[in-house]
Image (cartoon, helix red, strand yellow):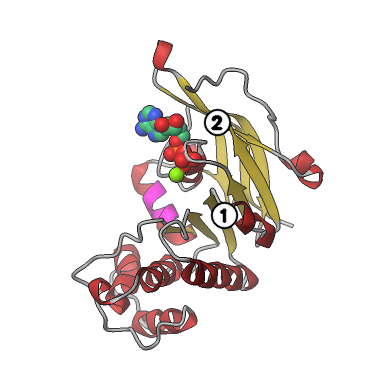
Amino acid sequence: MKKLIEVDNLTKVYGKGDSKTVVLKDLSFDLDSGESLCVIGPSGSGKSTLLHILGGLDNPTSGKVSINGQLLNELNDKELSTFRNKTIGFVFQFFYLQDYLTAKENVILPAKIASGNPSGVEDRAMELLRMVGLGHRLDHYPNEMSGGEMQRVAIARALINTPRLLLADEPTGNLDKDNADKVIEILDEIHERGVSVILVTHDEKLGKKFDTSFHVEKGVLVNNHPANQAKLGVLSNPDIHRD
Ligand SMILES: Nc1ncnc2c1ncn2[C@@H]1O[C@H](COP(=O)(O)OP(=O)(O)O)[C@@H](O)[C@H]1O
Ligand SMILES: [Mg+2]
C-alpha cells in the first residue's frame, strides 16, 4: 500500500547550551494511506511538537517528513501552505472557531481560502455538519453552541477540503465524557471513510480504538507494542533532561 507518511530520523531541539531540550530524537516511522495512529503521552512529552512538524506548521531541527510522497522541506512557504490546505486537516483542543461566523460559514472558510468560492461548497459544508450531527445548528454562532458542538464544527471544517490526513491535538481535552466519546466516534467514522487520522492525547484509553498507537515517555516516543516494533526507530533518549 502507498505510504501516506514517512518520517525519517526526525529530531527537534529547543534552546541551546544548558537550556537545550531534545523533544524528538531520531524518530522514524511510517503510516499507510488510510491507516490511523494514536500517540499517547503526558503533558510536555512532545506530542504537539510532533503533530505540528507532521503538518508543516513547524520545522524539525533535522530529519525528513514526507506526506503523500512530498518532502515537506522541499516546499517554500507558499507551496507548503497550499499543500497543507489541500492535504491536511487540523483539529485542536481549543476549537479555534471564528466567533463572528456561523457554523456553516466556519466550515466553508478553509475552502474559500484555498480556492475562492468553489461551487457546491455550501452543500458540502451542510453535508459535513450533518455528518457530525449538527444539521440543526447550521446557522448558529459559536457562542450559541456547547464545547462538544464547537469541536464537531471544527472537525467538519477540517474536512471541507477533503484532506487525506486529519491531525487532531487533544481534541477531547476540553470535553466531558459524552462529548469526548462522540468526537472519537466521529473520528472513527472519518477513518472508515478512508482518511488517515493521527490523534495525540494523554488519555490511554483512546489508543485502543486505533490501528497503531505509540507512547511518548520522558520526551521521547517509545513503542510499547511489539507489533509496531518495526515502525519506530529510537526507543530511548539519554540526552533528555527534565526537572
Ligand atoms: N517554542 C518552544 N520553545 C522551547 N521549548 C518548547 C517550545 N515548544 C515546546 N517546547 C517544549 O517542548 C516540550 C514538548 O512540548 P509539547 O510538544 O507541547 O508537548 P505535549 O504536546 O506533549 O504536551 C516541552 O518540554 C515544552 O516545554
Ligand atoms: Mg500538546
In this rendered view, identify the residue nearer to me: 90 or 72. Answer: 90
Up the image or down, 5 lies above or below 15; here it is below
Q: Which amino acid does label 1 sit on?
A: Ile
Up the image or down, 228 lies above or below 220; here it is below
Magenta region, residue range = 80-84
Q: In which quarter of the image is ligand 2?
A: top left
Q: Identify the residue shown where x is 54% and y is 48%.
A: 202
Query: Taking 90 as reference, is 62 left or right?
Result: right
Q: Residue 221: which quarter of the image?
A: top right
Residue 198 has which mark?
Answer: 1
> Which residue corresponds to mark 2?
219
Q: Is mark 2 within 8 Å of ligand 1?
A: yes
Q: What element carries label 2?
A: loop
Q: How crowded is mark 1: few (under 14 residues within 10 Å), some or many (20 or more)?
A: many
Query: Taking 197 as reference, is 77 left or right?
Result: left
Q: Which amino acid does label 2 sit on?
A: Gly
